[in-house]
């Protein structure tokens, strides 16, 4: 029997934001959809997130940001991924993200932005279609 490799997703909470309910819901939801999920926990630095992503050999880094620092934190994570030659890792973002910031996030390398109310199955479908 040929077992398909599970897609590995790192769910991370960068910065000082202490609200993790959304990140946990996404982590559990993606796990239930068949993804292998690693959750880093609260208050991770961009360096810690990238280190974990490289160590865990993930396919996707999903950042959950509610603090308003999404542009700065996401840029730092993407820069650190580039420094580690890990540009092949898909970066997605969820949380409280103003619509006006989405074009800039995409320009810096974010593949998908998911705001409050997004169905988890839609996140899973997005990941699968962007990795195939």
Image (cartoon, rainbow, N blue to C red):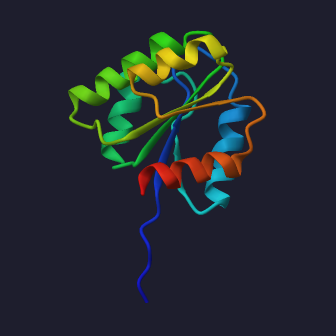
Of residues 122 and 12, the one drawn nearer to the viewer in this rendering: 122
Residue 13 position, x and y percent, is 56, 27
Residue 45 visible? The answer is: no
Residue 35: name its quadrant.
Answer: bottom right
**Does residue 102 lie above or below 1 as drawn?**
above
Name the residue furthest right: 117
Residue 91 visible? The answer is: yes
Quadrant where the N terminus sits is: bottom left
Quadrant where the C terminus sits is: bottom left
**Does residue 117 lie above or below 126 as drawn?**
above
Name the residue furthest bottom: 1
Q: Is residue 54 left or right of residue 20?
A: left
**Does residue 77 lie above or below 40 as drawn?**
above
Residue 21: name its quadrant.
Answer: top right
* Residue at 51% in and 22% down: 14
Q: Is residue 5 left or right of residue 94?
A: left
* Residue at 49% in and 47% down: 9
* Residue at 47% in and 64% down: 6
Of residues 41 and 83, the one drawn nearer to the viewer in this rendering: 83
Residue 91 position, x and y percent, is 45, 35
Residue 92 position, x and y percent, is 51, 34
Q: Is residue 119 left or right of residue 105?
A: right
Residue 100 position, x and y percent, is 61, 11
* Residue at 46% in and 57% down: 7
**Tally of marks:** 0
């Amino acid at each position: 029997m040929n077992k398909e490799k599970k897609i590995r997703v790192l769910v991370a909470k960068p910065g000082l934001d202490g609200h993790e309910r959304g990140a946990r819901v996404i982590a559990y939801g993606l796990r239930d959809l068949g993804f292998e999920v690693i959750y880093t926990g609260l208050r991770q630095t961009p360096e810690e997130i990238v280190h974990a992503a490289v160590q865990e050999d993930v396919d996707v880094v999903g950042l959950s940001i509610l603090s308003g620092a999404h542009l700065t934190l996401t840029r730092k994570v993407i820069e650190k991924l580039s420094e580690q030659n890990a540009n092949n890792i898909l970066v997605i973002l969820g949380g409280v993200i103003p619509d006006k910031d989405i074009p800039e996030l995409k320009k810096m390398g974010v593949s998908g932005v998911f705001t409050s109310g997004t169905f988890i199955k839609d996140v899973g479908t997005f990941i699968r279609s962007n990795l195939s």
